[in-house]
Image: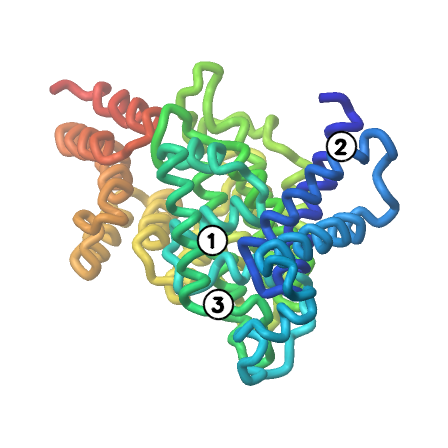
């Protein structure tokens, strides 16, 4: 693929959600809009290399997609009705007006639709990557370690669920936009985390997923500039992903944070992420992504691991725990306490949290909890107990790189 073709592909990928969104809003038909947008992209890939990218590519794609939609509708209606007649006879357009339409960009409408609460998290992620991200079903399936057929069924079922639920593409002033934007951020962060540390497979990271999550988060930030949390999410992803290339060595094995070569961290991403979080930090209520981005910024500004301000990080995690009292945040605070106040203090905190929340046995935290306790026990000199926890944590992870690292830690102690 030459430079021009790469440029064409970039434009098409960036404009795709806007085109699908515009067509879905106009016709109220999500599946058909996606098909028409794809046909418009095919037409563009054939004409643009020859004629050049038009001055307004989005308008060009929407016009072509609109014509494709008209053709599909006329075909379905066997030529009996024109498009305007179809729209006025569709029962969805005859329902009472639910309120004043919100004046927000079509790409945000599309993100909100893909993250509809009727869908499971897995379906929201798959639909977002397919429709808004433009990834193929095969690419999404490979990223999540399932067959292409399984992923195709998941995406198809998600679309059917939206149709059955009567999900509207048009959002109105009566809709809880804040709640839906929060759902979008959660989905994008789940996508990013899967890219940053794959839940299963032979590789620790999937840079393609992390990059796509950042791109979509930037899109969301542009659409809701008055909300500091989407900006903070972008900052968090940039500050975290800046360390990505140093998380594995030349053999693909895991490199813990203290041993990473900080000179190889992406300083451009760190600078941008720091600027964004400083601007997003409000004097009023602070959200969870602002706190997480602040934590990432403290890590990024430390020139060495020993120079990290762990007391500040422990305090930020405590504030985050008050807002989001989940197991992963609690375990992250334990690690911060260990570095700030010592491993014995951290073990006491972990034991208390385990008594209150069952971290060592909860399905969502048990693997991470055993790994954290293993490291703390290792630092306290309790070799036998540390070895046992390292082995349990290794057995519980589906990621091959992480499993090898934990087993190598266990093998440092005599059986």
Earlier sequence position, callout 1 versus callout 2: 2
- Determine the secondary structure under disc 1: helix
Residue at the (63%, 75%) spot, across then down: 88
- Determine the secondary structure under disc 3: loop
Distance in Å between CA atoms under marks 3 and 2: 34 Å
In this rendering, which labeled residue sits more in front, label 3 or label 1?
3
Distance in Å between CA atoms under marks 3 and 1: 18 Å
Earlier sequence position, callout 3 versus callout 1: 3
List the residue tagged with mark 2. 46
Q: Is residue 381 visible?
A: no
Residue at the (38%, 44%) spot, across then down: 153
List the residue tagged with mark 3. 167
Where residue 148 appears, x then y in whole percent?
A: 41, 34
Mark 1 and mark 3 in contact (Cβ < 8 Å)?
no
Vertical arrangement, residue 156 with respect to residue 48, above or below: below
Pointer 1 local density, CA inside 10 Å: few below 14, some 14–19, many at least 20: many
Q: Which mark is residue 187?
A: 1
Residue at the (47%, 33%) spot, across then down: 138
- In the picture, measured across the screen, residue 109 lies left or right of residue 260, that is right
Q: On the image, which quarter does residue 100 sit in?
A: bottom right
Vertical arrangement, residue 308 with respect to residue 24, above or below: above
- Residue that sits furthest to the top in the current view: 251
């Amino acid at each position: 693929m030459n430079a021009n073709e790469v440029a064409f592909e970039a434009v098409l990928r960036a404009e795709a959600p806007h085109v699908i969104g515009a067509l879905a809003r106009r016709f109220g038909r999500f599946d058909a809009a996606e098909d028409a947008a794809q046909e418009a992209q095919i037409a563009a890939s054939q004409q643009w290399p020859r004629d050049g990218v038009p001055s307004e590519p989005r308008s060009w794609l929407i016009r072509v997609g609109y014509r494709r939609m008209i053709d599909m509708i006329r075909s379905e209606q066997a030529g009996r009705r024109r498009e305007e007649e179809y729209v006025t006879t569709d029962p969805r357009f005859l329902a009472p007006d639910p309120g004043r339409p919100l004046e927000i960009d079509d790409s945000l409408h599309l993100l909100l639709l893909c993250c509809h609460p009727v869908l499971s998290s897995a379906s929201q992620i798959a639909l977002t990557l397919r429709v808004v991200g433009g990834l193929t079903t095969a690419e999404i399936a490979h990223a999540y370690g399932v067959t292409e057929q399984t992923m195709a069924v998941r995406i198809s079922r998600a679309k059917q669920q939206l149709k059955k639920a009567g999900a509207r593409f048009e959002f109105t002033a009566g809709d809880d936009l804040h709640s839906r934007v929060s759902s979008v951020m959660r989905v994008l962060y789940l996508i990013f985390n899967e890219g940053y540390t794959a839940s299963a497979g032979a590789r620790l990271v999937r840079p393609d997923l992390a990059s796509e999550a950042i791109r979509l988060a930037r899109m969301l930030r542009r659409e809701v500039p008055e909300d500091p949390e989407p900006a903070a999410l972008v900052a968090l992803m940039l500050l975290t992903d800046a360390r990505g290339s140093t998380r594995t060595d030349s053999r693909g094995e895991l490199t813990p944070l203290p041993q990473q070569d900080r000179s190889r961290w992406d300083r451009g991403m760190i600078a941008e992420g720091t600027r964004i979080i400083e601007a997003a930090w409000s004097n009023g209520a602070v959200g969870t992504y602002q706190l997480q981005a602040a934590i990432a910024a403290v890590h990024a500004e430390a020139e060495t691991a020993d120079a990290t301000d762990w007391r500040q990080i422990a305090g930020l995690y405590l504030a985050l725990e008050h807002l989001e009292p989940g197991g992963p945040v609690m375990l992250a605070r334990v690690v911060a306490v260990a570095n700030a106040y010592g491993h014995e203090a951290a073990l006491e905190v972990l034991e208390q949290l385990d008594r209150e929340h069952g971290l060592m046995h909860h399905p969502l935290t048990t693997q991470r909890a055993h790994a954290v306790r293993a490291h703390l026990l290792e630092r306290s000199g309790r070799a036998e107990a540390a070895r046992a926890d390292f082995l349990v944590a290794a057995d519980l992870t589906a990621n091959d790189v992480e499993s090898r690292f934990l087993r190598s830690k266990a093998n440092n102690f005599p059986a």
